[in-house]
Amino acid sequence: MNDLKSLTELGRTLDPPTATPPARLRHRVLTEATQPTRAWRRFPAPRLGWRLAAVGGLAAAVTVGVLATQVVSFGERTPVSTASAADRILAGAADQAHHRPALSVRGDQFVYVESRTVTMSVHEDGSERATITPALRRVWLSADGTRDGLVRTDSGGGPRDLPLPGCRGGTSTVSKNGTAAQVKCTPVPGYRAALPTDADGMLRHLYRSADGTKNPRDQEAFAAAGDLIREAYLSPASLAAVFEAVARIPGVRVVGDVTDAAGRAGVALARDEVQGLRVELIFDRTTHAFLGEHEVLARDAYGLTAGTSVNSTAVLKIAVVDRAGQLP
């Protein structure tokens, strides 16, 4: 399945036609573009944002020459207690976020996100054979969305690089099969400084993201929260507000203990969806720091049973660096 077909099919399924594709579609296109060409089809990801992820904890500053690198690591604070299991986890995640130092981000810098991913694919010959591909994924996102970033994946055969064209002056240069083309765009910043920093404001922001879609509004608000915290840096106050707002969305529940793609013990929260795939946000079982996500089958399909994980992402590191390709 090529990237243009992915945009078309997923756009029709999840959102009405618009002048430009929603930002959540970009992840599917770029993920598929970095996979080897073969007769295997990846499970479609129901939430197609940039896998924006932010992690609570401590920050460290590292200087290499004239390039300053700021890193966010996982927190170790004891989680607070609340009444229900889901509320307790989300309150702990918010507490983690509130107590981490804020990173300084300039518009000309890049948000670096390193993660471990596991992807399941099915063969297109009808045999229902499946393959599982683990990979190390590194992403450099333009802080203000205007500069060219980079995706680097390594599934064991060596790293593969894919440019992330920046959006400047309302247009972006995209290459396809060696041919460059100008497309209309809106900058998608890796750092969104203007997000609400309180639970009420963030909840309104999440529900505004549900406007104009075909899915239930509560489902879309939960999905919008996931879109915000994948592969991006949020300020401590905004990240905490996301978790506090999610606690107010009806239907969010604990779905069980899980192990993320990096082998860490976690607990998953989710909300039932109308599609066949469900996004589960994963939190550390003890500290409640955000770890990543699973995408699981909500019902039997592809010869697999409900609850099978078909995509998994474990966020390992978030940093702010000065150029695409620079490692913290």
Image (spheres, rainbow, N blue to C red):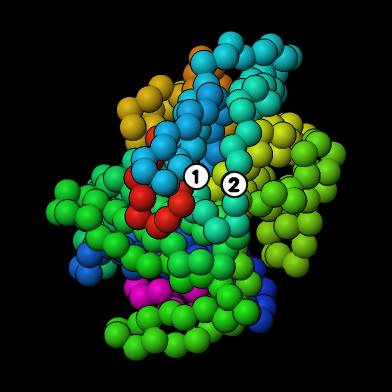
Residue in front for this viewpoint, 273 or 91: 91
Above or below, comparing residue 218 to residue 258 in the picture: below
Q: Amino acid at mark 1?
A: Val
Query: Which residue appears at 22% of the width and 50% of the height?
Result: 155
Above or below, comparing residue 258 to residue 79 in the picture: below
Among numbered discs 2 and 1, the one appearing first in the sequence? 2
Above or below, comparing residue 92 to residue 321 in the picture: above
Query: Which residue appears at 66% of the width and 51% of the height?
Result: 192
| Residue stretch rendered in magenta on the structure | 1-11
Callout 1 secondary element: strand
Label 2 – label 1 distance at C-alpha: 7 Å
Q: Quadrant of the C terminus?
A: top left
Residue in front for this viewpoint, 84 or 136: 136
Residue in front for this viewpoint, 243 or 302: 243
Q: Is residue 190 left or right of residue 299?
A: right
Q: Quadrant of residue 134?
A: top left
Give percent across and percent down for residue 259: 38, 28
Query: Which residue appears at 33% of the width and 28% of the height?
Result: 263
Q: Amino acid at mark 2?
A: Val
Dot 2 and dot 1 residues touching (CB under 8 Å): yes
Give percent across and percent down for residue 138: 36, 49
Q: Quadrant of residue 12?
A: bottom right
Callout 2 secondary element: loop
Q: Is residue 7 magenta?
A: yes
Residue highlighted by disc 2? 105
Residue highlighted by disc 1? 320
